[in-house]
Amino acid sequence: MHIEHVALIVEDYDEAIRFFVDGLGFELSEDSPSNTNDGRPKRWVVVKPPGAREGLVLARADGDQQTDAIGSQFAGRVGLFLRVDDFDSMMQRMLDHGVQFVTKPRDERYGRFAVFLDLAGNRWDLLGPHPG
């Protein structure tokens, strides 16, 4: 058993794809036409870290309630965690693509980490390799 995907509400599909693919190095796994439950057109967009089974479904906000949730899906807490093999290289890549970090890197028992914001303002942990 595993979690297949997690939905992330975004304002615009293409802007979100650019953020995750260019800024974070994710792969665009799927971008297909689809329909809402009531038949309106939408896209099924999935991005994944290279080699990952699980991904993010980039779900364009539909209606006021979803629009209001953009950037606050985790009520201001870190809600997503990205573990990488080379912390410093990934952080530099992200900075080069304009990703905003809200903490400086620091070392904890679970590895090096820093908090960053995605394009909507949701908080993520960038995590380096597990120590030892």
Image: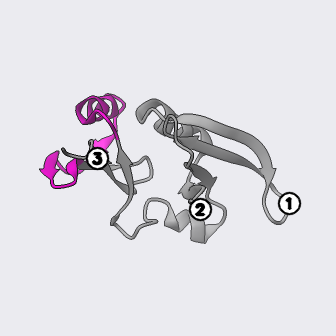
Q: Which residues are magenta?
A: 84-113
Foreground pick, 11 / 1: 1
Label 2 sits on a secondary structure element that is loop
Q: From the image, tell me which residue sits under label 1.
A: 39
Label 1 sits on a secondary structure element that is loop
Among the 4 quarters of the image, the one containing residue 37: bottom right
Report the Cα–Cα distance between label 2 and label 1: 31 Å
Q: Nearer the viewer, mark 2 or mark 3?
A: 2
Foreground pick, 38 / 56: 56
Foreground pick, 23 / 125: 125
Dot 2 alpha-carbon crowd within 10 angstroms: few under 14, some 14 to 19, many 20 or more: few
Q: From the image, tell me which residue sits under label 3.
A: 127
Report the Cα–Cα distance between label 2 and label 3: 24 Å
Pinpoint residue 27: horizontal percent, then vertical percent: 55, 34
In the rendered image, residue 111 lying in the magenta stretch gets the answer: yes
Amino acid found under the numbered disc labelled 2: Met
Q: Earlier in the sequence, mark 1 or mark 3?
A: 1
* Image point (16%, 55%), residue name: 109
Q: From the image, tell me which residue sits under label 2.
A: 1
* Image point (42%, 33%), residue name: 23
Foreground pick, 129 / 65: 129
